[in-house]
């Protein structure tokens, strides 16, 4: 009689899931460097490392690690490396002894007060060390490109209509030391998708301040040197023109003032050339796209922008009349 087959071995239990970095920090904080622990605690909770609560141990024991404790509920990191009390505390040692004695009596007023004074300085110290570890930055490439084009500071972010992704795409041109017309033309053609021409030295009127205007028998009245008739002077180098086209009516309307494309292009040009130079946007309309004069309705004329009168025969040349000034930067 044949022997009965041996029972199959029970399946091996699945290995337990690996703990998350935050859970590992809670269970074994001594395995983390201070800036590493701050990154885990701050990034997982969406908080800046400076805003995290830091505390120092109320004892003078020899520190065995940079992090000695982590409270998951509050996000508090206990470190002996920095603070008002503890092994590396800046206050005399009897403050640490007093704080430890109060904690043993369940009185935490003094430790909490000293923590309030030092926690922000601890966070700034952590940030100063973390900036030399760019690999821990969740978006290192984006921050590097923003810094290269000068957009990492918060002062310019709300003044530029172009999206950050658009500016990063053109970071090669926006961060170049030499700002040439060819670079500007290539950047705008990439953005618009139509031919672009940069007309240099188009010239423009510069308004003279009242203190710089000529007064006969007084200031600025030497003929051939500093005399100027009127309140403005013509400066050939003060302005250039950006010609776009020929284009159709749909794109022409998108380039008019008040439209998002107009604001985006003007902000990119201003960011490229700086605030010193003036410019004008000149969209060239194809002759077959010239609109008929309409006084009402959705396709009504906009005086000075989309209104052409006095032309009876069909046009054969592109219309170059529109000269659009940029909005204030």
Image (tube, helix red, strand yellow):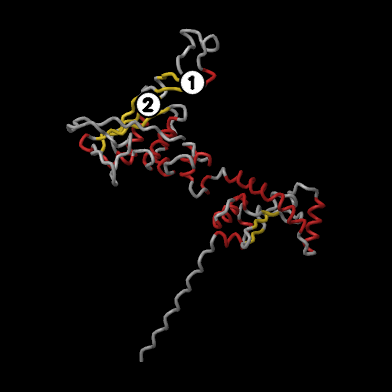
Q: Picture coordinates of residue 53 (x, y %)?
A: 65, 54
Sooner in the amino-acid sequence: mark 1 or mark 2:
1
Q: Residue furthest bottom?
A: 1
Q: Picture coordinates of residue 287 (x, y %)?
A: 21, 34
Q: Nearer the viewer, mark 1 or mark 2?
A: 1
Q: Residue furthest left?
A: 313
The residue identified by callout 1 is 208
Q: Picture coordinates of residue 114 (x, y %)?
A: 74, 52
| For residue 5, side relative to residue 307 (left or right) | right
Above or below for 323 versus 213: below
State which quadrant residue 194 falls in: top left
State which quadrant residue 101 falls in: bottom right
Q: Residue at x 78, y 58 (%)?
A: 100
| For residue 29, side relative to residue 183 (left or right) | right
Q: Picture coordinates of residue 290 (x, y %)?
A: 23, 37
Q: Residue at x 63, y 46 (%)?
A: 124
The image quadrant where one finds the N terminus is: bottom left
Q: Residue at x 39, y 32 (%)?
A: 325
Q: Secondary structure at mark 1?
A: loop
Above or below for 282 versus 76: above
Q: Are marks 1 and 2 in contact (CB under 8 Å)?
A: no
Q: Which mark is residue 240?
A: 2
State which quadrant residue 327 falls in: top left
Q: Residue furthest front?
A: 295
Give the alpha-carbon distance from disc 1 to disc 2, as whole Å.
Answer: 20 Å
Q: How crowded is the residue under tag 1: few (<14 C-alpha within 10 Å), some, or many (20+)?
A: some
Above or below for 113 versus 205: below
Q: How crowded is the residue under tag 2: few (<14 C-alpha within 10 Å), some, or many (20+)?
A: many
């Amino acid at each position: 009689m044949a022997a009965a087959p041996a029972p199959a071995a029970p399946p091996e239990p699945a290995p337990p899931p690996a703990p998350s970095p935050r859970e590992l920090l809670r269970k074994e904080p001594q395995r983390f460097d201070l800036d590493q622990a701050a990154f885990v605690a701050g990034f997982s909770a969406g908080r800046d490392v400076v805003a995290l609560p830091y505390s120092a141990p109320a004892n003078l024991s020899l520190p065995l690690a940079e992090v000695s404790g982590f409270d998951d509920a509050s996000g508090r990191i206990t470190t002996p490396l920095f603070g008002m009390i503890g092994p590396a505390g800046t206050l005399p040692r009897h403050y640490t002894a007093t704080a430890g004695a109060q904690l043993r009596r369940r009185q935490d007023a003094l430790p909490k007060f000293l923590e309030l004074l030092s926690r922000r300085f601890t966070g700034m110290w952590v940030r100063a060390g973390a900036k030399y570890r760019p690999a821990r930055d969740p978006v290192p490439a984006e921050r590097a490109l923003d810094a290269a084009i000068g957009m990492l500071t918060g002062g310019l972010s709300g003044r530029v209509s172009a999206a950050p992704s658009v500016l990063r795409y053109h970071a090669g041109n926006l961060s170049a030391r030499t700002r040439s017309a060819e670079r500007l033309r290539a950047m705008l053609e990439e953005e618009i998708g139509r031919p672009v021409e940069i007309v240099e030295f188009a010239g423009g009127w510069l308004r003279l301040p009242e203190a710089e205007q000529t007064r006969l028998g007084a200031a600025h009245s030497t003929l051939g040197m500093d005399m100027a008739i009127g309140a403005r002077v013509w400066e050939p180098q003060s302005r250039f023109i950006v010609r776009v086209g020929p284009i159709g009516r749909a794109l022409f309307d998108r380039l008019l003032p008040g439209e998002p494309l107009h604001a985006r292009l003007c902000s990119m040009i201003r960011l490229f050339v700086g605030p010193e130079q003036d410019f004008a946007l000149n969209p060239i309309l194809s002759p077959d796209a010239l609109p008929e004069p309409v006084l009402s309705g959705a396709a009504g004329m906009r005086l000075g922008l989309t209104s052409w009168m006095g032309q009876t025969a069909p046009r054969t040349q592109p219309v170059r009349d529109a000269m659009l000034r940029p909005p204030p930067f």
